[in-house]
Image: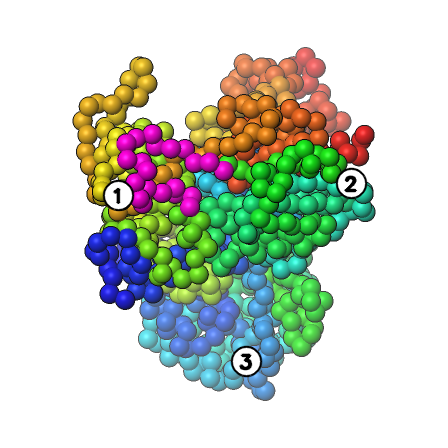
Amino acid sequence: MKDLYGANLHSTFLGIESPNPFWLASAPPTDKEVNVRRAFEAGWGGVVWKTLGEAGPPVVNVSGPRYGAIFGADRRLLGLNNIELITDRPLEVNLEEIARVKRDYPDRAMIVSLMVPCEEEPWRKILKEVELTGADGVELNFGCPHGMAERGMGSAVGQVPEYIEMVTGWVKKHSNLPCIVKLTPNITNILGPAGAAKAGGADAVSLINTINSITSVNLEEMSPEPMIDGMGTHGGYCGPAVKPIAMNMVAEIARNQETAGLPISAIGGVTTWRDAAEFMALGASNVQVCTAAMTYGFKVVQEMASGLSQWMAEKGYNSTADFVGMATPKVTDWQHLNLDYVTKAEINQDDCIKCGRCFAACEDTSHQAIEMSEDRVFTVKDDECVACNLCVNVCPVEGCITMRELPVGDVDERTGMTIPEDKRTWLQHPNNPSADPNTCIIRGQ
Amino acid sequence: MSNSQHTPGIVPGRLNSEAYSDNFSDLHPPLDDHEARVAADRCYFCHDAPCMEACPTSIDIPLFIRQIATGTPEAAAMTIFEQNILGGMCARVCPTETLCEEVCVRETAEGKPVVIGELQRYATDKRMDAHPYKRAASTGKKVAVVGAGPAGLSCAHRLAMKGHDVVIYDARPKAGGLNEFGIASYKSTNDFAAREVEWLLSIGGIDLKLGKALGNGLNLETLAADFDAVFLGMGLAGVNALGCDGEEKDNVLDAVDFISELRQSTDLSTLPVGRHVVVIGGGMTAVDAAVQAKLLGAEDVALVYRRGQDRMNASLFEQDLAASKGVRIITHATPKAVHGNGAVREIEFAYTKDTADGLKETGETFRLPADQVFKAIGQTLGDGQGLSLEGRKIRVSDSGRTSRDGVWAGGDCASGGDDLTVTAVAEGRDAAEDIHNTLMGG
């Protein structure tokens, strides 16, 4: 692939080499030899082949619409959901194709996603067959929230940590292939399933699988969409809209003591190089992509690679491993945030286009801290501003409103507090009944 | 038909039929649903929006655009009609580039405003099938409206809505005023002006009497006696003279008459136009006449204005439109004499310059060949009906009251406003509100 910036995008994940950290996630784009060959030609570093089930009569998919979407104004696809099941092609066909493609693209990562009933024998059996293909590893699909879950597979396993541990244990017992456990986000705390995967011997986790969702309701037919003969069911939600949820779960696993160090392959709305860099900064070693490829085709990987390369060159990172997890230590609990850190919104009058959105947002819904003059000049009232950042977020002009940090010694006009040199978190705050009283005395409060 | 752009004199059929339909098609083709949603998405839904302030009828622009963005253009149309019952025509003819779109914050930010005019047309077009308003219970009051142009129609509609019975008089054989007779054809295609009048009148309670004007079958005394209130919205009847030698020669014409004839023509290929055409003036009417003369196949059209370009009343958009159609704009030149034996052959101008003492001729002159000269240097009220005047127009209060009790006025014949369709609509509406309050309060 052309690389104008020369940064080394090479990625090693569980000892599996790939020319870049962009893999296609297990999904329709990786269901067939023809797709995967096109993906590799376009420059993808690896694929997770669409989930295989056990031998026997193939899975049956609906023959009505299987995707639903939400859009921006110009039909920019923001979120996608699907009710497609695992591969509906015969197992032996998939295995033959996997072997052929891996043989022809030895430098690309070839992971095979698996989902068989929750019994040891089917897992043992399919692992032996996958090993014969020359694939680099397996991914256990404990995530799909629709269809297969009703049959005791997919997220039905992923929602019960004990099952995750048990099945992962079988996989490690019967195969030496690197084992990635794919997690469902449809749980209350991602650390349970992640910890179970680790306890079962997983080499890595990948997350997130799709989120239970109804994307739209057809108000004529009064049915959820996608609609199959007048009825609908919840599907799995993915795409740019789910990225914040996925990033939090990745960060939780990366920073939690019990799971820290467990390699992570991040999935969830990766659309640009920047999304990938963000996931990796939070602790993922590589990323998996589906919706962006389904929306724009395989060529998107070329922007991801050039963008990441440019950014790495600018920052002086020699390999992707250099920045993996760099932001992880900055993810903390609320109680550790500095409560004496004070900022004030500041509006750059040269950049302001006088739309008044900051005023409406602050006046109607926040802290009445923006003043509007007769001639539409908007200024921040420092004695009211709590620095909530809403004005920054609703301002249509990037960089017009910024947050100015009050230096030590300055007085916060809102509270009268002089900014101290040392910081207080909630743990030292006088309003916290269980705070350390000494800190309060020092401040004279 | 063997005439061409080079045929001497004033002849019809200078173009082939395809050229006529191309030249006079919609200036801004309507947005389709997707285009409208994308255009609407650019609106920032400003607080106390500048566009709304700039609109003479104070349409809630951010609200109607958001209604378009959420797939309810019919609701958007109602937001528009609430303030401006002629919102459909205003969407077509408003100089939005000097009103709402000029102050759009995206104009400030990027030099590309939200296309408010086109969005307004999109919304109003969705609601032109059935009339959306019902009349209030009858008040038993009768109001006379003189002039079925934008001011009169707006006033009559608002009064009818409130339950009054209205008789609306117009001198012409068709209602609509300048919407019907005075606006460039490519701004009101498919007979829109007439369809809009029909749609507006279908609220009921408005009796239209054509071919009647003050001094021609009507007088103010009788109207004042026969009706509970009178609204005057008859526009300006007279045209200013050039005041130069030879003005009386043949083919020195009023631009408004040329535009009117063109608008009423059912076959533009039968409409004669000069090979060389000169238009005198710097406003919208001058541009409308000049552009349409060019589009009819005149070989060359010059628009001559006595002051600098920055003083022209026609907006920059209109000036650019004229230039793009091949009209030559000459500024700082004032007519000195019309030459020709019977009919105009040439027109002589003197160059002018701005001085501390006002506009002065430089002494240098030039001549332009002219088969037709169109005068567009402003119109006059004519008979003031004994009412107090302000300048050369009927003096009115903010709510349209004249110096005579029971008589209101608005639109081009009244003081204030910018002689725009949209200001006439606002004045008619506001006068109707005041008439209503007066009739019902007393």
Quadrant of the image containing the N terminus of chain A:
bottom left
Residue carrying label 1 = B342
How far across and how far down the image is residue A152, in percent?
68, 73
What is the CA distance from the residue labelled 3 to the residue labelled 2? 77 Å
**A352 relative to B200, above or below:** above
* Residues marked 1 and 2, same chain: yes
Contact (CB < 8 A) between labels 1 and 3?
Answer: no
The residue under the point 60% across, 26% down is B386
- The residue carrying pointer 2 sits among few (fewer than 14), some (14 to 19) or many (20 or more) residues within 10 Å by Cα, namely some
* Secondary structure of the residue carrying numbered label 1: loop
Q: Which callout, 1 or 3, points to the residue nearer the camera?
A: 1
State which region is magenta. Answer: B237-257
Q: Earlier in the sequence, mark 1 or mark 2?
A: 2
Quadrant of the image containing the C terminus of chain A:
top right
* Secondary structure of the residue carrying numbered label 3: loop
How far across and how far down the image is residue A245, in percent?
59, 51
The residue under the point 19% across, 30% down is B365
Determine which of the numbered discs, if any, sits on residue A88 in the image.
3
Which quarter of the figure has residue B231? top right
Q: Is residue B249 magenta?
A: yes
Dot 1 amino acid type: Gly
Q: What chain letter is assigned to the residue under label 2?
A: B
Residue carrying label 2 = B141
Q: Is residue B114 magenta?
A: no
- The residue carrying pointer 3 sits among few (fewer than 14), some (14 to 19) or many (20 or more) residues within 10 Å by Cα, namely some
- Give left or right: position of A228 versus B186: right
What is the CA distance from the residue labelled 1 to the residue labelled 3? 91 Å
